[in-house]
Image (cartoon, rainbow, N blue to C red):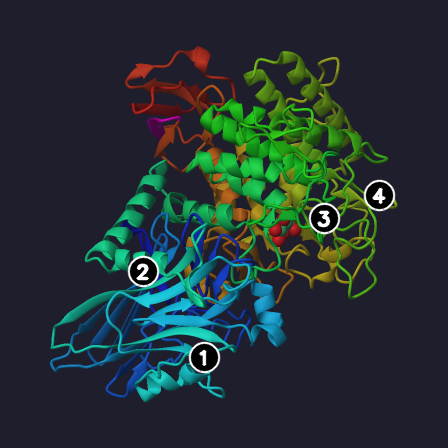
Amino acid sequence: MDYGFFDDASREYVITRPDTPLPWLNYLGEDDFFGLCTNTGGGYTFWKDARLRRLTRYRYNNIPLDSGGRYLYVNDGGSVWNPGWKPVKAKLDRYECRVGLGYERITGEKDGLEIDLTFFIPQGRNEELWKVRVTNKSKVRKTPKLFSFQEFCFYEALNDMTNYQRTWSIGEVEVESGAIYHKTEYRERRNHYALFACTRPVAGFDTDRDAFVGVHEGLHEARAPFAGRCTNSKAFGWNPVGAHEVDLDLEPGASEDFAFVLAYVDQGEAPKFERPGVIDKSKGREVLARWSRPGAVDAALAELRAFWDGLLANFQAELPDADANRMLNVWNQYQCMATFNLSRAASLYETGIGRGMGFRDSNQDILGFVHMIPGRARERILDIAATQLSDGTCFHQYQPLTKKGNAEVGGDFYDDHLWLVLSTCAYVKETGDASILEEPVGYADRDYAKGPDGRRRHADGTPAESLLDHLETSVAYTMKKRGPHGLPLIGHADWNDCLNLNCFSKEPNESFQCAGDVAGSKAESVMIAGLFLKAAAEMSGLYAFLQRPVAAKRMEAARAEMLAAVESQAWDGEWYRRAYDAEGRPVGSRDCDEGRIFIESQAWCALGGAGADDATDAEGRPAASRGRARKALESVHRELYTEEGIVLQQPAYTRYRLELGEVSSYPPGVKENAGIFCHNNTWIHLALCELGEGDRALEYYRSICPSAKQAKIETYRSEPYVYAQMVAGRDAPCFGEAKNSWLTGTAAWTFVALSQGILGVKPDYEGLRVDPCIARSWKGFKATRRFRGATYEIEVRNPQGASKGVKRVLIDGDELGPAKAEAGKGVVLPLFPAGSAHRVVVELGD
Ligand code: BGC
């Protein structure tokens, strides 16, 4: 079955039938104001924080799955339908949903009436627009009535869906000329309200849900649209909604354009009330006036499209692989914006209530975002760092609105702090801005005052600890927190949230991660060891850039100590072990009956430089560890690779193992229990690129590339335009089915793997490094990269069918001297003045 296609020229995915295998999602907004919008208009809108400032309601896991959202009903001479098919689900003569960058354009046509509906959030505004064009394509005059509808949320989403003894008595609205002001709780501590209005005159409105929908009716049979009129109801308590009736009169061929506006209006310090009980609406009126001006809505949409064109121009490539090409150029970068903004908070799998911003998640998200808007990445790094505690551990999650760590989840995930090193170094490499390291960030468990310059200070006036202090604390913490094998302790878990080696959860009503005390725990993680190797190497590179050779050496020494522990304690013969449990037994070893080999430790040990092809011992002789990385990756291929991607471990756990935690709680083949976690597939892609395995890197990439799944979409089910966190592994009955699309570390890491690993275009401190590792069959590729203000138009040629190895480099026609090319690491292109453009030809070969 075909559900759609990529319109590459328009940078849109076109969904051609509404009954997709799962609801397919898109996001509106990319700054402070966001909407989730499915291909039938489902979803909701919030300001900054999906839990604390939710404007409209959505009932997750509803029946059907995606019901509720931005609905427009049409009553055309008694025939009632929706252009987005839902909720009435009347058969349409034509349906199309164009998934665009920051907008969703849904067109529905029935009996000669066409409704073209575009949802988007204009740049820099706290407003969502529903741009509507109604066209009478028939040969007779038509007088359709349109009904807008959405349900207001009482801002705090958890309270909104749990505390009806209160919420059913607090709902309040005001209506002025059909503009609906949702002012629940405005009388007390809130100084913000929501406005839902239409840019053209309306024939009526409803604000009481029971009046518009009915008490016993569902949205598919809502009373007002079927009756053909709104009742001008005023909500008092219960459930306030926003609904308008628009009556049109269209001659054959005639169209009418208008828009609905949903706004979040913050009164700030302005007086809240016009007169007792009546809110000051001046800001709301301004918003409505702005969008009522002819051309304003179209101009805002054009501005949004131009914004994305500009942003994507920072990195564009022409690859011989159409799937990789469109993912890299458009959809992957678009997804990176969503993960940067929303971490793992609000998708169809995350309710916006459970999790805020994840410490490790957000640091990784920055890796795929920093090239787009480095200034925002800078701010985010500082926010995240401020949730680290002075001993080095971190709040695992924090709320975006308050920027405060989530005390319920707490910390003690002993990988968290190391990701901060990776994000910070990526930022400095991208921008050359080392000043971020001096920013006084401070720790979450200390009190600071703000100095006259707005910066955090200790009581004695000295600046709070800097970001660089945080990085040092992070490295020191891992070195300090090591177990009997000299490997890092794991705490509650490492990247694999479900490998809980210290928690021993026996009670169904306790959390796997947080049960028990990790204080005296002995369980160790090889994955953290590998990550540490990488982080310490990054720190040493950073210090070299800062011209602090002593500190760089100190980092190298720490790295060497960890490397020795990895090579002597973690090698299993064919691969690296995954961990040691609390009793010191290996996890991920040939001696285990299940869970013999895990993906994460192979990837991170290799990326951290363990088992290198040129490893030497202290005397400079070939070390016993030489070639282990290659061997480990060969084991990954043999034991874990499938045509749908690499499974996380094998054999899957078939029963619950108290000593391993949540990982064994999942049925075989899903999630961390041998599912295909796309996120960590990308680490293997990168490791393969380090070793020059370009053919395999591309083959592996294609195995998880959503664009390449279109032919098997009935099995894959999720959106073909964004990566999913997980695809069911071969142990599952639904092998190949994707879940948890959109908000996943896969987004950032695939961008890194493809752009920096396979294409080899890597920001570095002194310039832009180019070190491709491509499939031998590729004759070359082109990439345009904006870096520190200059544009590099790179053409890579591969006349000899090589995978790796830079033979020759021409910059603007001049040969680059051999001094610039480092053996095995490609070439570092020099920095150029901002605004200049340069043609670079890179020839691969021996
Ligand atoms: C979490 C990540 C974690 C991953 C693997 C995701 O759901 O957001 O933090 O690393 O699962 O367990």
Three-letter amino acid code of the residue under disc 4: Ala
- 334 relative to 74 in the view: left or right: right
Q: Is mark 1 within 8 Å of ligand 1?
A: no
Give the class, few, some or many, for how many residues have Cα within 10 Å of label 3's Cα (few <14, many ≥20): some
Kind of residue indicated by mark 1? Arg
- The residue that label 3 is drawn on is 410
Q: Earlier in the sequence, mark 3 or mark 2?
A: 2
Tell which tag, 3 or 1, sits nearer the viewer.
Answer: 1
Question: Looking at the image, is mark 3 or mark 2 nearer the viewer?
Answer: 2
Q: Position of residue 454 (x, y in %)?
A: 54, 31
Q: Amino acid at mark 3?
A: Gly
Q: How many C-alpha atoms fall within 10 Å of the one at disc 1: few (<14), some, or many (≥20)?
A: many
Q: What label does residue 285 carry, if any?
A: 2
Instruction: Say which residue appears at 68% left-offset and 48% top-offset.
Output: 496
**Magenta region, residue range:** 788-798
Whether residues under marks 4 and 1 lie with C-beta atoms below 8 angstroms apart, the answer is no
